[in-house]
Amino acid sequence: MAYKIRVATISDLEQVLYVSNEAFLADSFFKKPEFHRRFKFDDIMAMFSKENAFFLVAYVDISDQVIGSIYLEIYTTPFPTISGHFSAVSVLSKYRNLGVGSALVEAAEMRLQRFTSSNDSSTGHSGQPRNKVMDIDVVSVRPDLIEWYKKKGYVVGAETKPAEFISEVQPELDVCLIRMQKSIGG
C-alpha cells in the first residue's frame, strides 16, 4: 500500500478527527462510555492553531484519504535543549500493523531533528548544535504501547503523573501517564 506523510492542512482536520476517534476506541476498556470518542472538532482545531505545533498525516497517495495522524509540539527551551512532545498517534484500524504508526513517529522525530530555533541567533547561539529530546506520555493501562515505544528507542523516565482526563476513567481503575523519552540526533 502506497502512502505518504505530510503536514496537515486545515482541510485535513475533519479526517484527523475521524482517524483519531476511531483509533482511540482501543482505549474504551478503561474509559467511561461517554468518553470513548477522544476528541471533538474544537479540540483538533485548538491543537492545530498552536504555535510550533503540527499534525502530520499519513495519506493514501491516490485518494488523499488520511489513514493516520500524529500531533507534535516543539518547545524552544533555553539553550541547549529543544524539546518535542508528540501525542494522539492514530491509525485507522484497517491500516494497523503495516508500519504507518512507526512511520508517523519517525516523521515527527525527523521534524524535531530539523527544527532550529529562531531565538538562537538573538542569543548568540546561532549555528551551535542543540540537544533535542522527544517525549510522549503513555497511559499506564496500555503496556502494549509502552513496549511498542521501547522498541523505537524510548525509555521510561522517572516521571509519572495523574492522567489529566481522570474524570473520564472507570472509577475502579488506577490510571496515570508515564513519560517516555528519546534523545534525537542534533
Image (cartoon, grey):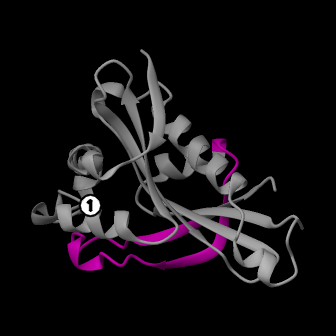
Q: Amino acid at mark 1?
A: Phe
Residue nearest the observer in this picture, 40 or 138: 40
Q: Is residue 68 visible?
A: yes
Query: Residue at point 25% right, 72% down?
Result: 172
Looking at the image, residue 29 lies above or below residue 170: above
The residue sitting at 72% across, 63% down in the picture is 116
Q: Left or right of 2: which side holds 173?
A: left
- In the rendered structure, the answer to whether residue 28 lies left or right of residue 68 reads left
The residue stretch that appears in magenta: 151-179
Q: Can you say which quadrant of the picture contains the C terminus?
A: bottom right
- Would you say residue 40 is visible in this rendering? no
Taking the spot 29% from the left edge, 26% from the top edge, the residue there is: 94
Comparing 95 with 171, the one in front is 95
Is the N terminus in the top left, top right, bottom left or bottom right quadrant? top left
**Residue designated by label 1:** 30
Q: Is residue 92 magenta?
A: no
